[in-house]
């Protein structure tokens, strides 16, 4: 499984300290397992089957997709708990 990050998510990760980035990336790697590991919930109001992963006070918005029979994990956005849903 390939993990692809959006520009916004990479920008957010660049502002964090190394320990926090490692914690978030470890949680994202847990999403590649079968079944996915973590505090995961399906987001309401989206038709593309988006989900959110809770990592402490941060939230990772993601979805699964396929390109040329290769499964891809799209990281749509990463942010703080209060700001990510706005």
Image (cartoon, rainbow, N blue to C red):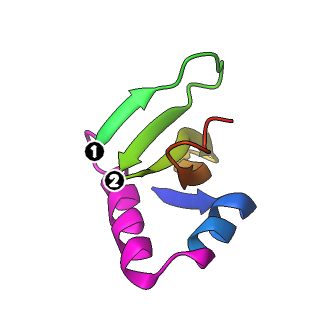
The N terminus lies in quadrant? bottom left
Above/below status of 49 relative to 65: above
Above/below status of 25 relative to 72: below
Q: Residues within 10 Å of mark 2 (few under 14, many from 20)?
A: few
Range covered by the magenta-colored residues: 14-35
Mark 1 vs mark 2: in front:
2
Q: Main secondary structure of the magenta part?
A: helix
Residue name at image x 38 percent, y 45 percent: 54
Residue name at image x 49 percent, y 33 percent: 51
Front in this rendered view, residue 49 or 24: 24
- CA distance for labels 1 and 2: 11 Å
In the rendered structure, are the residues bearing label 1 and label 2 in contact, judged by CB atoms less than 8 Å apart? Answer: no
Q: Is residue 17 magenta?
A: yes
Residue name at image x 65 percent, y 21 percent: 46
Residue that carries the numbered disc 2 in the rendered image = 56
Above/below status of 18 relative to 36: below
Q: Residue furthest front?
A: 82
Residue that carries the numbered disc 1 in the rendered image = 38
Q: Residues within 10 Å of mark 1 (few under 14, many from 20)?
A: some
The C terminus lies in quadrant? top right
Q: Does residue 26 appear to the left or right of 75 in the view shown?
A: left
Mark 1 residue element: loop
Residue name at image x 47 percent, y 81 percent: 17
Q: Position of residue 56 (x, y in %)?
A: 33, 53
Q: Does residue 53 appear to the left or right of 39 in the view shown?
A: right
Specify which label sits upstream in the sequence, 1 or 2. 1
Q: Is residue 25 magenta?
A: yes
Q: Dividing the picture into quarters, in which one does residue 34 lie?
A: top left
Mark 2 residue element: loop
Q: Residue furthest right?
A: 7
């Amino acid at each position: 499984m390939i993990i692809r990050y959006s520009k916004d998510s990479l920008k957010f990760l660049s502002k964090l300290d190394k320990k926090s980035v490692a914690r978030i990336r470890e949680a994202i790697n847990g999403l590649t397992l079968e079944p996915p590991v973590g505090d995961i919930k399906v987001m309401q109001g989206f038709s593309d089957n988006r989900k959110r992963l809770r990592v402490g006070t941060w939230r990772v918005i993601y979805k699964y997709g396929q390109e040329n029979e290769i499964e891809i994990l799209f990281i749509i956005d990463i942010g703080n708990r209060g700001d990510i849903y706005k």
